[in-house]
């Protein structure tokens, strides 16, 4: 089913948010509705439509991005992209060492999405004079994960640290830049903004509000980018337009939900910087 088909299901009331007040509950929702079996655009849309808070909106778009940006990601379970390094210098960067006795991954990453429940990790690691991407399972020997106690942003989503202690890596787990999506830099904003647009549309419909042209505009823009299979600079410019349309829709949505549901509005106010999380980067890339 395409994006328009999913929008019709929102309009008909056959998709509604599911109360998921913990990450474990959100995982149950994700599995119950088989969201991980969908194509990336549908995954972002349906996940966003089912989400009852912005933590799960972000996570839906993030998971969809993982499957689109890294085509080698496993279909089942949750995956995180580990790229951030410790800036203090206290924890060494992640390095992939290739020897005649095999490949070994060691070092640290400072941010892991859904660290309490992630199943697979794509780790950007330094190897000699270039970066390689390593697909690592959570349960692999030498992998350690811990979570922050109280994240300030999207606090329901566990966010943690990863340590790799001489983790054995097979050749089948190694990937290069050529294995990534041709629109790699734009995949995260595209999918997260699509999930956010679906969330706003579903919540509006749930509380009896009209799906105005402004509320559905980001959904239509996202559909056009997907259908036209735009690449390169044109894709980034399209995502920048999607970002602007989402900001306009978010202003209208905030006014509506403030009148309709105070609890939802307070959560929206707490985390609504998700709306403009990509704006500055998109503006720089599309000048």
Image: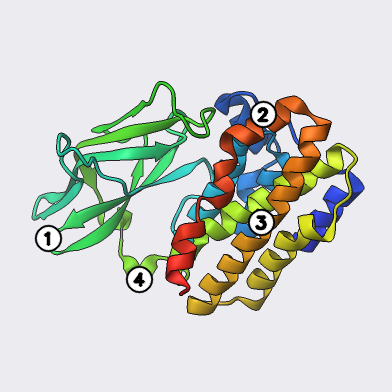
Marks 3,2: beta carbons within 8 A: no
- The residue mark sitting in front, 3 or 4, is 3
Ranked by sequence position, the earlier of labels 3 and 2 is 3
Left or right of 88 on screen, residue 15: right
Q: Residue placed at 66% from the left, 44% from the top?
A: 47
Q: Is 113 rendered above or below residue 244?
A: above
Closer to the camera in the image, 111 or 164? 111
Ranked by sequence position, the earlier of labels 1 and 2 is 1
Ranked by sequence position, the earlier of labels 1 and 4 is 1
Density class for disc 3 (Cα within 10 Å; few <14, some 14-19, many ≥20) is: many
| Residue hosting label 2 | 266
Q: Residue placed at 76% from the left, 36% from the top?
A: 17
* Rendered location of residue 190, percent (x, y): 57, 60
Image quarter (top left, top right, bottom left or bottom right) of the N terminus:
bottom right
Work out how far the residue at label 1 is from the one at label 2, CA to CA, in angstroms. Answer: 48 Å
| Residue hosting label 1 | 128
Ranked by sequence position, the earlier of labels 2 and 4 is 4
| Residue 65 showing in the rendered view | yes
| Residue hosting label 4 | 178
Closer to the camera in the image, 119 or 285? 285
Closer to the camera in the image, 165 or 246? 246
| Residue hosting label 3 | 246
Q: Residue furthest top?
A: 149
* Rendered location of residue 167, percent (x, y): 21, 40
Work out how far the residue at label 1 is from the one at label 4, CA to CA, in angstroms. Answer: 18 Å
Q: Looking at the rendering, which quadrant does residue 176 occupy?
A: bottom left
Q: Residue placed at 83% from the left, 49% from the top?
A: 10
* Rendered location of residue 189, percent (x, y): 53, 57
Ranked by sequence position, the earlier of labels 1 and 3 is 1
Q: Secondary structure at mark 3?
A: helix
């Amino acid at each position: 089913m395409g994006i328009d088909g999913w929008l019709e299901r929102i309009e008909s009331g056959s998709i509604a948010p599911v109360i998921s007040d913990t990450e474990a509950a959100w995982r149950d929702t994700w599995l119950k509705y088989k969201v991980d079996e969908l194509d990336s655009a549908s995954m972002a849309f349906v996940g966003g439509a089912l989400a009852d808070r912005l933590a799960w909106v972000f996570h839906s778009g993030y998971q969809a991005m993982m499957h689109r940006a890294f085509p080698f990601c496993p279909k089942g379970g949750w995956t995180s992209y580990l790229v951030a390094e410790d800036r203090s210098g206290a924890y060494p960067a992640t390095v992939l060492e290739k020897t005649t006795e095999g490949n070994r991954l060691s070092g640290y990453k400072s941010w892991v999405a859904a660290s309490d429940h992630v199943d697979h990790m794509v780790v950007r690691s330094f190897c000699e004079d270039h970066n390689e991407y390593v697909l690592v399972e959570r349960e692999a020997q030498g992998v350690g994960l811990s979570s922050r106690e109280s994240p300030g942003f999207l606090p329901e989503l566990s966010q943690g640290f990863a340590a790799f202690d001489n983790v054995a890596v097979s050749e089948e787990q190694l990937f290069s830049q050529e294995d990534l999506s041709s629109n790699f830099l734009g995949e995260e904003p595209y999918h997260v903004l699509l999930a956010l647009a679906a969330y706003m549309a579903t919540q509006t419909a749930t509380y009896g509000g009209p799906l105005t042209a402004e509320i559905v505009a980001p959904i239509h823009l996202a559909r056009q980018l997907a259908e036209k299979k735009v690449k390169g600079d044109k894709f980034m410019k399209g995502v920048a337009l999607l970002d602007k349309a989402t900001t306009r829709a978010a202003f209208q949505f905030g006014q509506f939900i403030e009148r309709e549901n105070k609890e939802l509005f307070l959560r929206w106010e707490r985390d609504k910087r998700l709306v403009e999380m990509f704006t500055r980067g998109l503006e720089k890339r599309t000048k």
